[in-house]
Amino acid sequence: MSKESGKEISFFVDRIVGGVVTLVYEGGEFTADVPIRVLPPGTIEGDYIRASFVPDREKKNRLKDEIDSLMDELEK
């Protein structure tokens, strides 16, 4: 994990079809389809994948600054 506290969850790799992976949230509450390229190399059906959700405050602030700058330019 990073400096900021986040949430880590586990997914089961249910199937891989045409470069799309169907992940099943542990407990079967929901599924997610993601491109195979975003998963670790060598991921296969039957694997478990851990995913971490951590706020990216730096990116948020950087994009906010860019938007503010663009808005200032538009107002001129």
Image: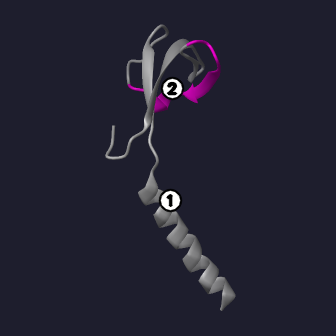
**Kind of residue indicated by mark 2:** Ile
In this image, 64 relative to 47: left or right?
Answer: right
Residue at 48% from the left image edge and 64% from the top image edge? 61
Question: Vertically, is 18 above or below 71?
Answer: above
Residue at 57% from the left image edge and 76% from the top image edge? 68
Q: What stretch is highlighted in magenta?
A: 27-40
Question: Vertically, is 44 above or below 1?
Answer: above
Q: How far apart are marks 1 and 2 (CA)?
A: 26 Å
Residue at 46% from the left image edge and 65% from the top image edge? 62
Residue 12 place in picture, x, y as percent: 51, 14
List the residue tagged with mark 1.
Answer: 60
Residue at 46% from the left image edge and 47% from the top image edge? 55
**29 magenta-colored:** yes
**15 magenta-colored:** no
Residue 24 place in picture, x, y as percent: 58, 16
**Kind of residue indicated by mark 1:** Lys
Give the camera-side residue of 70 and 9. Answer: 9
